[in-house]
Image: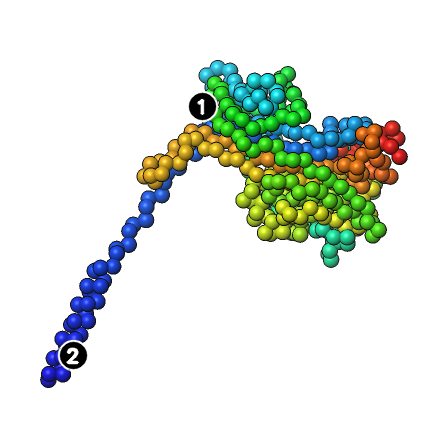
Amino acid sequence: MRRTMAAGLLALGLAATAASAQSRKPRSQPAPPAQKVVPPDTVYWMTAVTQSGFGLAGTPDTRQLMRLASGRGGGVVRTLALDLGSRRLPQGRPEAAHAIPPAMRMGASLPLVTPKRDRPPPPAGPVSEPEDFERPKGRLLLFWGCGETARPGQPVVIDFTKVAEGQIPPNLFVGERVRIARPPSPDRWPTTGHWPNETREGRREIPAGASLVGAHRVTGTYIPDIAFELTQDWMAPLDLRQTRLPTGALRLDWNAVPGTTGHFAQLVGGSGSGREDLTMVYWSSSEVQTFFSALGDHVAPAEAARQVARRTLLPPAQTTCTVPKEAIVATQGGLVSVVAHGPEVNIIHPPRPEDPRIPWVQEWAVKVRFAGRAGALAGMDVAAASPSGRPKCQPSAVEDVSAGVGGALGGALGRGIGRALGRKAQPQDCEP
């Protein structure tokens, strides 16, 4: 009986000890309330690009292409796009301006012009094809990946006639998983202001030696005052070199630019002189199949890191890539380009309150994004121009395939590529 009583007392003691220990454990604290965030009603984007040669971002820059073809060379230019968006409506005429630092060497300020609203579209009605409508013909060959020879399963052939009939090839956009942010535009913001524009000050080119570093201030009749400092400047220029390899492939080499978050190279070309025998060629440096990829657009640093991991963007340290010989053989002429995606500066006013119980009511936000680009005729080494400043000739650098390319693709992309490819190199344009 004594053993039974001792066992009972021991059990009671252990239970009491456990209860005491449980009472001493810290109680879990409730999760802090999520801070309420009110987005700004005014945003301002600055897009600064360092361009070598001529561009192939979206629609080719035909002005730079003509400068190259006329013997003046593409050179290195710095471009700037300013896009202001506000949910406020102005009292009277909308006006805004960006006061720039003296280091930009462009005066005191740049006007941000509000575009005129287009008239509303006519009521929707039955759509009929015009009598002279001709369905597109020809084909598009898709290549991707760096290497002297094309990968197995390439090229993917897209028949324009079948596409016009609604027969879209399966998995055409299998590699397109790119997050692209768009600057303020009139279709998404009640009031906007932009530079460049059609005013005299809105058509100025960025002078050589201009710098973005310094104090900036944006004011207007429909926005709060926006003041910020920049220490980041335009990226250094890309120096694109091209080398014809014995196999017929085209090796691309470029320099490493500080601040680069990822690279992307592409080739757009074609052969044939009309709609019947048109063959268009598209190649990209992605290890994943792409089709006129958004990877050549502005990609934010976090997204660039994700795309480098997916092997759709080349790593920042990689400065060479080879266009397969099959893609070069298939095109009689084309445009090659390399993009160095760069850093971003994001400023939000006022700063986030440290106390999560205080809502973060954002008044305005500024995004400044940077990129470096280089473009050239495929096979023409712009960087290795002759001492006279004229680019050295390459046979069949560009053939007149503009009508076929533009007609087959249609839309702004087709017109832009068609115009760019349609400018034949004249004998006086370059040295033999």
Does residue 78 appear to the left or right of 268 in the view shown? left
Q: Quadrant of the C terminus?
A: top right
Residue 354: assigned label: none
- Where residue 80 appears, x then y in whole percent? 61, 28
- Give left or right: position of 338 versus 20: right
Quadrant in the rendering for residue 297:
top right
The residue that disc 2 covers is: 7
Which residue is identified by label 1?
Answer: 224
Q: Hey, which residue is sitting farthest bottom in the picture?
A: 1
* Residue 107 seen in the figure: yes
Foreground of the two, 63 or 103: 103
Above or below for 205 versus 127: above
Residue in the picture at 74% in, 45% down = 252
Residue type of the residue flagged with mark 2: Ala
Q: Residue at x 26, y 55 (%)?
A: 27
Q: Residue at x 16, y 71 (%)?
A: 13
Residue 142 can be seen, yes or no:
no
Q: Residue at x 48, y 15 (%)?
A: 92
